[in-house]
Amino acid sequence: MTTDVRAGLPTADTEAAEWLREYAAQARELEDLSTSVDVVLVAGMAGFTTAAEVLLDAIGARRAIRASRTDRRHLGWYQSDRVRPMLRELASPLIFRIGDALGIVAGLALLWWPIDWRTGAQLTILAVALLFAGRRDVRSVVLLVVSLAGAMLLDVGRWWYCLVAAFLAWTLLSYRSLAELLEAPWGARGPILGMVPARIRIRLMITGRAARLANAVDLATASRADVAAPFVTLCDDLPAAVQPMVEICRALLALDRGDVDDALARAARATARDRPMPATVRGWCLAQLASLLATTGNPEADRWRREAIPLLTPRSCRRYARPLLLAEAQQYVLAAPFPDAVRLVHRYRLLAVRRREFDLLRLTEMWLARLMIAHGRLEDAAVALEQLVSGEDGRTALFGSRDETANDLLLRASVQLDRRDRARVDPRRDVITALAMLDADARPLAATTGRLLLAKLDDAAGDGTAALVQAASALTAAQHGRYMLPSAAWRDSWSRTQLDAHATTLALASAHGDSPMVAEIIEITRGEVLPSVTDARTLSALAALDATATDIEHVAGAAGSDVAEGVATVAALQGLSPVRQPPRVRIGSGLRLPGLNPEIAEIDLDRELDAIGPRTWYWSAVTVLDDCYWAVRDPAGQWSHGRIPLSADTPAAAAYADLLDALPFARPGEDAERIRARVVAGALGRAAGPRAERDMLGRIAAAFLPPPLAEGLRRATGDATLVVSLPTALGHLPVAGLPLGPGSDLRVVECAAVLHMPSWGVVHAGRRFHGGPRRGTWPARLAIVAPHGDADMAVLERPEGVGRTVRGPLTKRQCRDLLHAMNDDRSWLLTLVGHVDAVPGNAAAGGLRLAAGEPGKVDRLTMNDLVAEESDRPFEMPERVVLIGCGSIGIGPPPALLVGQAPASEWLGLGSAVVLAGASHVCCTLYTVYASAHLKRMTDALIAGLSSGAAPVAELRRVQLAELARWRDGQRTFPVLWLSLAYVGRGWDTP
């Protein structure tokens, strides 16, 4: 681009960054030129003498300014295009004042015709007086009084005409000032109730109820909940056709209160497909729904906005259609190819120039600034945003909402981080002002961004402690908002937008050197959840808001694909899994990072670990971006921490790729037979031999096993317990089989029993009081094998040591009745053997495959079934459960160390459901297992051990040690099978 306006718009061959650089450079040159706007401003502030000098400069720059304006084929510069709109705003009051005075004087002249010299002089003096009407400065008031007095003295008989003329001029000027203040921008013009059909609107006006609805809609959509609430309350008696609008207003009020759950549920009910309402009313409701979803970080907001636009095509709805079109245009600008994006900017810029719309003109320049950010031109974007963004004084920008003003301030501050020495505005002030305008409870997304910016500013200033405090507050706000969202996919999308908060907080804490602080931040970052029991009506409404796929993917490959389509999702809710925040994990005497909800309970981690045993180690970790942060606690209560790089060229990434090759996770295009053949021939099968198995696990241990933990277990003199709390990405690590040193064959399980703790909150919530003395044995009363009804588990159909074995198809109701009949005292062992189906993106919908009530179909025993509180016969699990199925622990989908992966770990699968249903000790599997005589041997050994009086963790270790000994002795076994066995539960028995 050049200074010649005929340079035109960019083409497909134009390099975006270079085009934007030249645009910004020319803008800075034009900024130094004087315009007619500067003349008017200088005249009002510095006087006419200085203005005359500026006028000469403006005349000299007039040609350059005119040559830089936008026309039909060219995109001009903001500095040139804004001259006419600003000049109109500056000059229109003076022109109106002159026209007002001349009009009143002309009217009096017609009234007094014919005019003599005395009348002419009186009218002349009166005209001068009217020019000062309405002004509040002392000089103007004095001139007004003197002029009016002179006009009345010329003809005392007409003195009252002069007073009436002055009052009329003042009234017209006041009306014009008020109209100018209330004039809406181009994107918000039109009647407030324009979406209501004319016949209903007329009826509301006749009955006097239109004002109530208009005030409720106007105030609720303007984020003024405190003022809007009384008007919304008075709208209960409105016609049914507009009741969805009232429900949307209540949803917006709930959002302002920070009650996102209630807001989403109300908005979902208001926009339900089967709810009758006029098309324009539905369009308005969908528009507000899109705004609400955008506030909560839901990517589905764009879909609902696009659906609302065609419904708001009538002219009366332009007040609401235009903002949607502008929002859609902004999304297109950021996502479309650069030439197409600039053409769309040019289209709206031309509209703004022709209509003299300064707000629309400013919006198009904001789009260009965002393009500069997207293409790496941060310096140019920072300079542009310094001129465009206002509100640093705490006042909402004119014709902008509170949220828009705060977000613009945060955007400007974000691009000023690396140029604070050159910034014209203080980025810290922008952030503090934006946070003061928002409520962290109601706007966690903006609150997270603001706190994170303050952390980076403090870190740049060398104040690491203050930076850590701000970053931790950002992380707390991010997780607080996440718990409000009703689906796993939605929460995952939210967490991905907050990766910077997680990474910054962990990096600052790790550098700070406070290991307990790192451990507490790891627990917050993991984002543990508890399932939330919600009524069916609300869940059905929320289902319409989420587009989570309902396809079932069986982790064993194609073996389960034939039944995937027939497996019903829980309540047909398309992936919904509402959650609530579990108790916070506390390390030491108190929380270092208080949460936003002071009513959340706390779990004393030190007490929990001490209750498990005197020699208990703890290992927790979290993966964020391309790093893994870990924390280890030794039996003495001392903490240590570290970081493991996970980028593509690191040893950890290479070792993890080798592990995935050896585990039964499906690759694209693989069926069950190919997966099984690969696993059997892999390092954890039999074909490769012990050396390959030891070498591969040695690489995993060298990459992921924390050195303090490995060294401490090697030096341990007695049997210890290792509590492992790993994220989803690392939850499938075969911790029990990891060697404790280079070249060593000493395994973790030989020094410690391994206890998996995917969620402290779930285990804590699943505890129940068990009265009476401690039992010596837990009889294996019942085994349920292959409840889906297929004959693919014949080798596992007769587990040893079980009092009663039920084989074959079982429906959900039959399974409930069976457990209810056997569960008198709950001090017994239940064995479940079957297929566990997984739902991608929604672990809570996965479960044990059952037979359905209709022939040929299947069902599943899921989290919703086991947690739902039914009054007649709820599912209640006994104290001890052996759960043999594909990935029955339920920690999520196949693992992947991917850059940008969400760090949160939601344990909502079958294993957690069994714990929440009352089981205290559960033996399950980390990944897919295959029905075989080897698995039968291990299952029988687990049943024998857990039905005895020994500790369940120790019995699982005994089985693993026996299989390890068989492997070393050359007997037939598969490491991939015994390494999949895992214990979850509280880890200790009730005395």
Image (cartoon, rainbow, N blue to C red):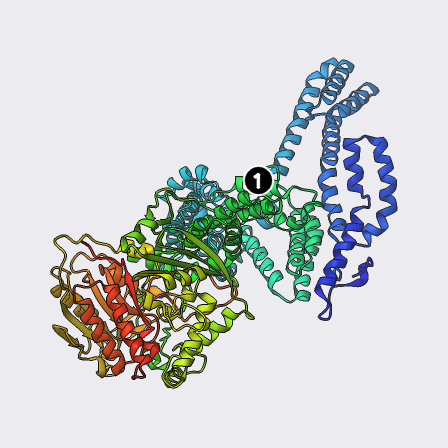
The residue shown at (41%, 39%) is 229
Residue 817 left/right relative to 863:
left
Residue 172: percent from left, percent from top: 65, 31
Residue 274: percent from left, percent from top: 36, 61
Quarter-of-image position of residue 157: top right
Pick the residue in front: 810 or 654. Answer: 654
Specify the amino acid type for callout 1. Thr
Find numbered disc 1 in the image and state the secondary structure of the residue it sits on: helix
Residue 364: percent from left, percent from top: 66, 54
Q: Badge 1: few (under 14), some or many (20 or more) residues near its Cα, within 10 Å?
A: many
The residue shown at (75%, 31%) is 102
- Asked whether the viewer can see residue 40, the reply is yes
Pick the residue in front: 25 or 162. Answer: 25
Pick the residue in front: 867 or 192. Answer: 867
- Asked whether the viewer can see residue 186, the reply is no
The residue shown at (11%, 61%) is 824
Residue that mark 1 sits on? 433
Quarter-of-image position of residue 42: top right
Residue 782 left/right relative to 215:
left
Q: Quadrant of the N terminus?
A: bottom right
Residue 818: percent from left, percent from top: 14, 68
Q: How many marks?
A: 1
Pick the residue in front: 233 or 668. Answer: 668
